[in-house]
Image (cartoon, rainbow, N blue to C red):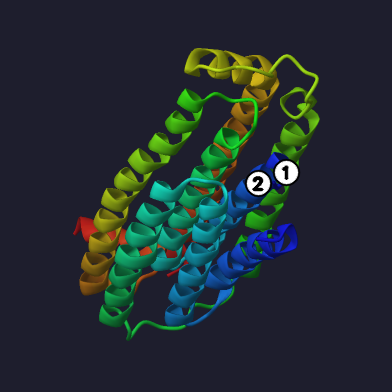
Amino acid sequence: MMDQIHLLILGIILFCVGLYALLGKRNVIKILMGIEIMTIAINVVFIALGSADFVGDDFQIFTQIFPIISIAIGAAVMAVGLAIVINNYRHAKGVDSDEMATLKR
Amino acid sequence: MSLAVIYIFMILAILAAIFAIESRRLMFAVIGLILMNLCVWILFLVLNAILLAWIQLIVYGGGFTALFVVVVALTEKQKDELFDWKRSAIALAIIAVIMGFAIWAVVSSEALFDPAGSLLFAFDLEDSLNALWNARTMDIILQGVVFFATSIAIGTLFISHKKKKVKEEIKA
């Protein structure tokens, strides 16, 4: 069985890659991809916590149910985000996050 | 499955995520996302989270990918994104600090990984949560500090950007 700490570090690195997209990129589609990667990283961390030998069955079930809720919420967020991207593209003819202000007009 | 193969999949997931973020063409970025989802799916299967693995593959690997492909196709006339060195450097510096803190916080909490520690035989949910709380109080404090610093950093990024825009408008 693989080491739990390596899974936690995998989660941290994936989260930071998503955060880099959020901070460093201006393309809104890439920012949404970053949010998706961050959500997956959190799910990996939950599963890693539940996969330890010392935790009980209840806790393992809890750590597997919580990511399912997170996936459902993430689906809604992503659908709304992509709808905003398409609306922004119709207004500003681009997907740059700096041009999002044109949606106000 | 051999342990080495699982670690290779973990590294592949990170590389695919970086490829998805850094590739200039958005279609390639979507392919990177699919690859990352497949690697994470294999990891979940190995970790005995079978239902979650399939839900993740269906929702993220299938549904979102289709949605992303549609959106990329609808917005295909966009300009190529120029690499913003200043912005990327600031973001990388912030992320290096966060990643360092987070990895240090995880590695330094030895109690969770110590087989002789007090965390053994926590059979029910409450015991497990209590054990996690006892072992990871320091983590939570550190993460609070990290999130506070991050929010301030993000705020300063936006403020400096707004100031720059106002200056450009005045110049124009």
Position above or below: B35 against B129: below
Helix, strand or loop status at disc 1: loop
Asked if residue A45 lies left or right of residue A26, the reply is right
Circles 1 and 2 in contact, beta carbons < 8 Å: yes
Q: Mark 2 points at which residue?
A: A7
Compared across the picture, whether B44 is left or right of B93 comes to left
Q: Where is residue B172 in the image (x, y as percent from the top left)?
A: 42, 70
Mark 2 nearby-residue class (10 Å; few <14, some 14–19, many ≥20): many
Q: Which of marks 1 and 2 is in front?
A: 1
Hey, which quadrant is residue A83 in on the image? Answer: bottom left
Q: Kindly identify the amino acid type of the residue bearing the numbered disc 2.
A: Leu
* Mark 2 residue element: helix
Look at mark 1 in the image and give the residue it sits on. A3
For image coordinates 43% across by 29% down, the residue present is: A62
Residue pictured at 28% horizontal, 62% vertical: A82
* Place of residue A93 in the rendered image (x, y in percent of width and height, measured from the top left): 28, 77
Q: Which amino acid does label 1 sit on?
A: Asp
Pick whichever, A87 or A33, lies toward us.
Answer: A33
Residue A29, x across and y down, in percent = 39, 67
Asked whether B168 or B94 is in front, the reply is B94
